[in-house]
Image (cartoon, helix red, strand yellow):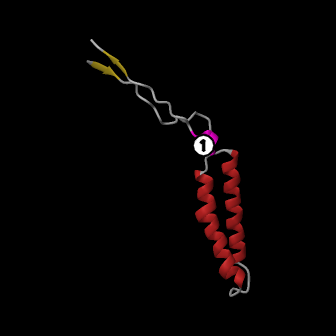
Amino acid sequence: MARVAAKVSAKRKAQPGSLPFTKRNYQILGVGLVTIILGYIALAQEPWDATLPLVVAPILLVLGYCIIIPLGILYRSKAEKPSTEISGTTETKA
């Protein structure tokens, strides 16, 4: 008995000339960049022992670097997720 199995390609092939990021990804990355800039501006305020440089600035920086930027990189809308089609195997008898 010979079995012929169709290979299923679950990987999504990248189209030449298309970018992996959408407009939404760039918007999220822009918000992250603005948050980081605001964190550095808050960090540079005087007096150095006030609430803004000691509390608000580190919160903004951690939020920008650890949450918003990775979210912008990893974000993919539900409509973009590829659907996988599973082909059945065909058996032939010799």
Local SS, label 1 = loop
Q: Which residue is mark 1?
A: 20
Instruction: Kindly report the secondary structure that dominates the magenta region of the rendered protein.
Output: helix
Tell me if residue 56 comes above or below residue 36 in the rendering: below
Q: Residue at x 64, y 73 (%)?
A: 59
Mark 1 residue type: Pro
Magenta region, residue range: 77-81
Q: Can residue 78 be found in the magenta stretch?
A: yes
Q: Can residue 38 be found in the magenta stretch?
A: no
Nearer-the-camera pick, 51 or 88: 88
Question: In the figure, residue 66 lies in which quadrant?
Answer: bottom right
Tell me if residue 63 comes above or below residue 80 in the rendering: below
Nearer-the-camera pick, 90 or 73: 90
Q: Residue at x 69, y 80 (%)?
A: 53
Tell me if residue 7 comes above or below residue 27 in the rendering: above
Question: In the figure, residue 19 lies in which quadrant?
Answer: top right
Q: Residue at x 56, y 37 (%)?
A: 82
Residue 38 position in % (x across, y down): 72, 69
Residue 1 position in % (x across, y down): 25, 18
Residue 34 position in % (x across, y down): 72, 63
